[in-house]
Image (tube, rainbow, N blue to C red):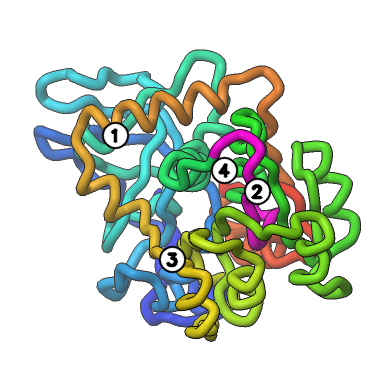
């Protein structure tokens, strides 16, 4: 089988290798999956860089999220051959950027009827995070939410989920053409932080300030977003796309009584009950299956062209996901 690995951490375009390997055989509690589509997420690239919360055990495979078909069933036949499944995988020899993977039965989720592999392979990390964060924020209809990196896959999911609940959404972008695009998804305000002052733009539209921020960027932009929060507001930090720590205005936190809270989906899914996890997945699938819910794809590349896919991922102004397909 073809798989993508790296023997040292660094820039993906520098360290990733494509090689031929033997397809893994499943243990009794596992299934073997023929992987059909894989989603490139920021977490994948941070893992390859060695800057993610989980460190690679080198040499390591790459990729956290994918969808495919069960090619060999578990010993008890709980997930039969031919079942279409979506899944996440972490750690050495469990990356999704390969043609075949073995995983425990409990880690795979059957794909709903009518959902394509292209959608299913990006139906976990970003949309589940978006639903979980909107739930956690307890924002009410009419309250304002600010998203940094609004044109990211997460941002687009969060916009649509928030709007379905009547929440007002502001978001940051870096290209003017993304403004109309996000407005069509339901964003009430999009601010190009390359040209516009974020605090001033928010103050003009929402004088009382934003109730909550979902920050995927960190660094200076995260600090500017924090300054837009109203008294008793909250910032949920779940990403650091800038690769820079956020400078925090301590006085503002004190006098506005603002809360900054970290959010890591992998850790949360391990802590909640099976029932809560199943409910979260069901709520997410229900959103994804709505007729007017939009999941965008910018391009598809075979595994052998992974470096071209990474280049396309970094294209400025990109509006859809980059997939690795088989």
Q: Is residue 299 visible?
A: no
The nearer-to-camera label among 4 and 2 is 2
Image position, residue 27 (x, y; %): 12, 39
Say whether disc 3 or disc 2 marks the residue closer to the N-terminus.
Answer: 2
Location of residue 7 (image quadrant): bottom left
Say whether disc 1 or disc 2 marks the residue closer to the N-terminus.
Answer: 2
The nearer-to-camera label among 4 and 1 is 1
Q: Is residue 87 above or below residue 275?
A: below
Q: Residues within 10 Å of mark 2 (few under 14, many from 20)?
A: many
Compute the Cα span from label 4 to label 3: 41 Å
Q: Which residue is mark 4?
A: 325
Is 168 positioned to the left or the right of 324 in the image?
A: right
Q: Which residue is mark 3?
A: 259
Looking at the image, which is closer to me, 188 or 210? 210
Say if mark 3 contacts mark 2, CB within 8 Å: no
Q: Residues within 10 Å of mark 3 (few under 14, many from 20)?
A: some
Say whether disc 4 or disc 1 marks the residue closer to the N-terminus.
Answer: 1
Kind of element beneath mark 1:
helix
Is 40 positioned to the left or the right of 271 in the image?
A: right
The nearer-to-camera label among 4 and 3 is 3
Residue shown at 46% from the left, 69% from the top = 257
Is 12 covered by the magenta stretch? no
Q: Which residues are magenta?
A: 140-152
Say if mark 4 contacts mark 3, CB within 8 Å: no
Q: Which residue is mark 1?
A: 277
């Amino acid at each position: 089988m073809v798989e993508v690995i790296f023997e040292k951490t660094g820039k993906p375009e520098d360290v990733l290798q494509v090689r031929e390997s033997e397809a893994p055989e499943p243990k009794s509690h596992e299934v073997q999956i023929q992987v059909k589509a894989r989603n490139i997420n920021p977490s994948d690239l941070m893992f390859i860089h060695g800057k993610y919360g989980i460190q690679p055990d080198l040499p390591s495979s790459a990729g956290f999220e994918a969808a495919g078909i069960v090619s060999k069933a578990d010993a008890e036949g709980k997930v039969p051959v031919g079942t279409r499944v979506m899944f996440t995988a972490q750690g050495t020899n469990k990356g999704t950027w390969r043609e075949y993977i073995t995983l425990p039965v409990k880690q795979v989720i059957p794909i709903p009827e009518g959902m394509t592999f292209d959608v299913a392979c990006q139906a976990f990390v970003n949309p589940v995070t978006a639903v979980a964060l909107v739930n956690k924020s307890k924002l009410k209809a009419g309250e304002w939410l600010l998203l940094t990196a609004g044109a990211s896959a997460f941002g687009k999911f969060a916009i649509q989920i928030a709007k379905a609940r009547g929440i007002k959404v502001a978001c940051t972008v870096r290209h003017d053409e993304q403004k109309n695009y996000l407005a069509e998804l339901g964003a009430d305000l999009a601010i190009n932080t390359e040209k516009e002052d974020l605090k001033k733009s928010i103050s003009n539209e929402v004088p009382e300030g934003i109730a909550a921020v979902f920050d995927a960027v960190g660094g200076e932009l995260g600090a500017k977003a924090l300054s837009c929060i109203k008294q008793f507001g909250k910032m949920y930090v779940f990403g650091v796309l800038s690769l820079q720590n956020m400078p925090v205005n301590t006085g503002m936190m004190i006098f506005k009584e603002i809360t900054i809270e970290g959010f890591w989906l992998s850790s949360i899914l391990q802590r909640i009950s099976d029932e809560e996890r199943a409910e979260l997945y069901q709520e997410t699938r229900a959103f994804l299956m709505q007729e007017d819910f939009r999941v965008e794809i910018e391009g598809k590349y075979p595994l052998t062209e992974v470096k071209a896919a990474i280049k396309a991922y970094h294209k400025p102004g990109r509006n859809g996901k980059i997939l690795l397909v088989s």
